Image (spheres, helix red, strand yellow):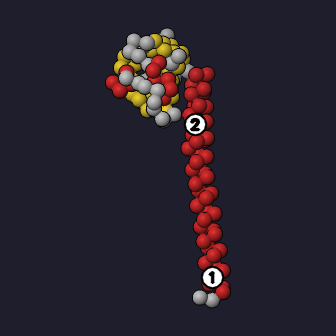
Amino acid sequence: MDTMTSIITIVAGLCITLFSAVVLAAALYGILIWFPRQRNNRVESLKASGRQGKAVILRIPENIKGYHSGRKALYTMITIGLEIDVPGIDIYQVDKLFTFPTGWLGALEVGKVVDVWVDPKNPRDLDKIVIHVT
């Protein structure tokens, strides 16, 4: 192999390595910073512009009832059954998938009343229902 081919091979390898590092950094930024920020902004926007009411937890997954603090994940996706009561809107029930902080799973229990915000234009839109569990 001559000198020029060796130089081109080394430069191409460096370019591929740098490109891979940039893609990996962008993916980590998106997953760890940008996506959670966007989700929080969407929740805060709905709380500011949505209609507030109360919801009763009707159903939670069986494995949540035996929650123990030894879990390692920061967030857990769970489906919660709610009966939503918002002033000016008929009472209705939904089953919605929430991304919930794993450390707060112990606060979920059937019959608990939680704050809820819904989109006043489309209150049954599952993407626009937010709860606050304390």
Between disc 1 and disc 2, whose residue precedes? 1
Residue shown at the point (45%, 30%) measured from the top left: 70
**Residue 44 shown left or right of residue 122 in the figure:** right
Residue type at the position of mark 1: Ser
**Residue 103 shown left or right of residue 82 in the figure:** right
CB contact under 8 Å: marks 1 and 2? no
**Residue 22 shown left or right of residue 64 in the figure:** right
Res 127 seen here: no
**Residue 109 shown left or right of residue 7 in the figure:** left
Q: Residue 106 or 77: which is nearer the viewer?
A: 106
The residue that disc 1 covers is: 6
Residue 114 lies, in percent from the top left, at: 48, 15
The residue that disc 2 covers is: 36
Q: Tell me where residue 94 sits by quadrant.
A: top left
Q: What crowding class fits label 1: few (fewer than 14 Cα within 10 Å), some (14-19), or many (20 or more)? A: few
Residue shown at the point (61%, 78%) measured from the top left: 9
Residue 64 lies, in percent from the top left, at: 39, 25
Query: In whole angstroms, how far apart are the C-alphas of marks 1 and 2?
Result: 44 Å
Residue shown at the point (58%, 48%) measured from the top left: 28
Q: Residue 6 or 53: which is nearer the viewer?
A: 6
